[in-house]
């Protein structure tokens, strides 16, 4: 049975494999790697395993799983397999860094250190290998008024539904693009809280672009489920398509969604709650801060970490699995987690080359089968340019620092070359979320101003800690002599008189400078 820890003080000094994130990929990797005899620590900041897709799965009732659908219910078996494993598990743990081991760490026999804050204690945990299974985050949707109270992400509404069986009251409008939009609408209908409208911003031209990939999609497991979902939702609620602009308006809270269609006509939809969503993107903060190289994916219009065929990043010993390495969905994330667990066992000499080759080939075959048809979805639900790059100057881009699109655009016109220079001018990306909500938008706005690809502009350069950690926890961490000298200029030690090699102070302290 997996063992749970509530304080970083109780963790071992090091593990063979430290996994960050207890979503589909992390759970599968932990069960696989521990099955091969590796000592595994699974660190997750949520209060229960499952990640976003299987959130609340361990506490869900049969009625909950039936209402949320079979894809959600599949997480029950996965979480049960993890619970039966020998992996150590921390819930509520904040992982703020992954880095090579400090050369001055005494007797360190591991190449990597993972910074973890848990139970009010911060520690650096040693690791032979690290797997980042940090999942995805919802893409920014910077329309005018998206910061009003009463506007939230569709993913947040789904979390409330999964964890607390809470459905919105009053009039709800869902707007954006992507499969989750229709899935959430279906789940709200099943929960007795149907939205008054679903505003689909998917560009019509995307159907033509995605058409060559339709034959493969038609053969996939997505096809029947996806088409049924679209028709079922369209039968039950109003669906508005061919949309070119959105604006959320209201006084001290959201009151009306103004929809502009591609033919120029406008419509006002009064509502109490607006749920926005236009797909998801890999959560890059930890992989970027760990130094993993990133690349621009034009098909999905997002940055993702570079990985080889075995999901290993550009940094030695660090693998990335699941949506954190590129959007693949829950089923593929599980298989990628199994691959990452297998790779860890092989690299640490726990399985033979023959076993690795055989199991690896089987897993890759399963992965290819699950990903069949994925390209069609990627092209069909690529968000429209006008919703990725705000057209109006009054739209807020960086919510943390309240930086508008107009300020980003004006600063880009001065010749700013990339997001890190923009950060120095405007502080965008320097708030508590560390650029998770504005990174893609800022990079694309600069690229548009320069007339180049976002690949030439790059992404925010991040440094640990990637999330806020109380200063008292850092201060209480053991420090190396080099770190103390760098800050104070000297190191003090208590010594016996006559045994000191440095300058001896009157109170028997030795001071080394």
Image (spheres, rainbow, N blue to C red):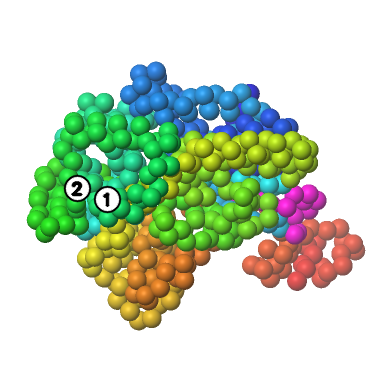
Residue at point 11%, 44% (across, down): 270
82 versus 483 height, above or below: above
Whether residue 108 is in magenta: the answer is yes
Look at the magenta stretch and give its main secondary structure: loop
Q: Quadrant of the C terminus?
A: bottom right
Which range of residues does the magenta coloring cover?
Answer: 103-120
Can the viewer see residue 46 in this picture? no
Q: How crowded is mark 2: few (under 14 residues within 10 Å), some or many (20 or more)?
A: some
Residue at point 48%, 28% (across, down): 75
110 or 121: which is nearer to us? 110
Residue that badge 1 annotates = 202
Could you say where residue 93 lies in the image, as x and y percent from the top left? Answer: 54, 41
Residue at point 75%, 59% (across, down): 104
190 or 262: which is nearer to us? 262
Q: In which quarter of the image is the N terminus?
A: top right
Q: Residues within 10 Å of mark 1 (few under 14, many from 20)?
A: many
Q: Is residue 473 left or right of residue 231?
A: right
Could you say where residue 445 lies in the image, as x and y percent from the top left? Answer: 34, 68
Q: What element carries label 2?
A: loop
Q: Tag on residue 241? A: 2
Say whether disc 2 or disc 1 marks the residue closer to the N-terminus. 1
Residue at the farthest top position: 62
Q: Does the residue at mark 2 contact the one at mark 1 (Cβ under 8 Å)?
A: yes
């Amino acid at each position: 049975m997996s063992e749970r820890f509530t304080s970083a003080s109780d963790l071992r000094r090091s593990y063979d494999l430290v996994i960050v994130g207890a979503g589909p990929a992390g759970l599968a990797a932990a069960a696989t790697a521990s099955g091969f005899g590796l000592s595994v620590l699974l660190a997750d900041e949520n209060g229960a395993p499952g990640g976003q897709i299987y959130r609340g799965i361990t506490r869900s009732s049969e009625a909950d799983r039936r209402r949320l659908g079979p894809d959600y219910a599949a997480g029950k078996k996965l979480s049960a397999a993890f619970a039966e494993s020998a992996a150590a598990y921390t819930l509520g743990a904040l992982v703020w860094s992954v880095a090579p081991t400090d050369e001055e760490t005494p007797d360190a026999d591991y190449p990597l250190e993972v910074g973890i804050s848990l139970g009010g204690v911060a520690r650096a945990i040693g690791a032979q290998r690290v797997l980042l299974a940090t999942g995805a985050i919802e893409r920014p949707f910077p329309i005018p008024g998206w910061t009003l109270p009463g506007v939230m992400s569709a993913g947040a509404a789904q979390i409330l539904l999964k964890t607390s069986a809470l459905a919105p009251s009053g009039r709800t409008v869902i707007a954006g693009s992507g499969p989750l939009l229709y899935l959430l609408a279906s789940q709200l209908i099943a929960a007795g809280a149907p939205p008054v409208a679903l505003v689909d911003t998917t560009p019509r031209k995307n159907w033509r672009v995605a058409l060559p990939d339709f034959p493969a999609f038609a053969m996939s497991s997505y096809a029947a489920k996806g088409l049924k979902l679209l028709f079922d939702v369209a039968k039950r609620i109003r669906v508005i398509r061919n949309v070119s602009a959105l604006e959320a308006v209201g006084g001290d809270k959201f009151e009306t969604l103004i929809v502009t269609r591609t033919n120029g006509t406008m419509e006002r939809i009064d509502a109490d709650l607006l749920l926005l969503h236009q797909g998801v993107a890999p959560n890059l903060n930890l992989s970027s801060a760990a130094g993993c190289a990133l690349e621009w994916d034009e098909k999905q219009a997002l940055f993702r970490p570079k990985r080889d065929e075995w999901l290993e990043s550009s940094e030695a010993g660090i693998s990335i699995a699941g949506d954190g390495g590129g959007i693949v969905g829950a089923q593929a994330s599980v298989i990628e987690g199994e691959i990452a667990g297998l790779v860890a066992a092989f690299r640490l000499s726990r399985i033979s080359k023959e076993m690795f080759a055989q199991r690896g080939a089987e897993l890759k075959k399963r992965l290819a089968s699950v990903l069949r048809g994925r390209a069609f979805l990627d092209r069909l639900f690529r968000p429209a340019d006008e919703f990725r790059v705000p057209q109006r100057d009054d739209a807020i881009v960086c919510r943390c620092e309240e930086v508008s699109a107009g300020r980003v655009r004006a600063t880009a016109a001065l010749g700013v070359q990339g997001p890190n220079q923009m950060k120095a001018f405007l502080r965008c990306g320097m708030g508590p979320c560390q650029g998770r909500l504005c990174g893609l938008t800022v990079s694309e706005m600069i690229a548009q101003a320069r007339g180049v690809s976002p690949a030439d502009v790059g992404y925010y350069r991040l440094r640990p800690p990637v999330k806020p950690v109380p200063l008292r926890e850092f201060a209480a961490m053991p420090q190396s002599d080099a770190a103390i000298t760098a800050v104070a200029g000297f190191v003090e030690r208590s010594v016996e008189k006559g045994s000191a090699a440095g300058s001896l102070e009157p109170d028997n302290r030795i001071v080394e400078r």
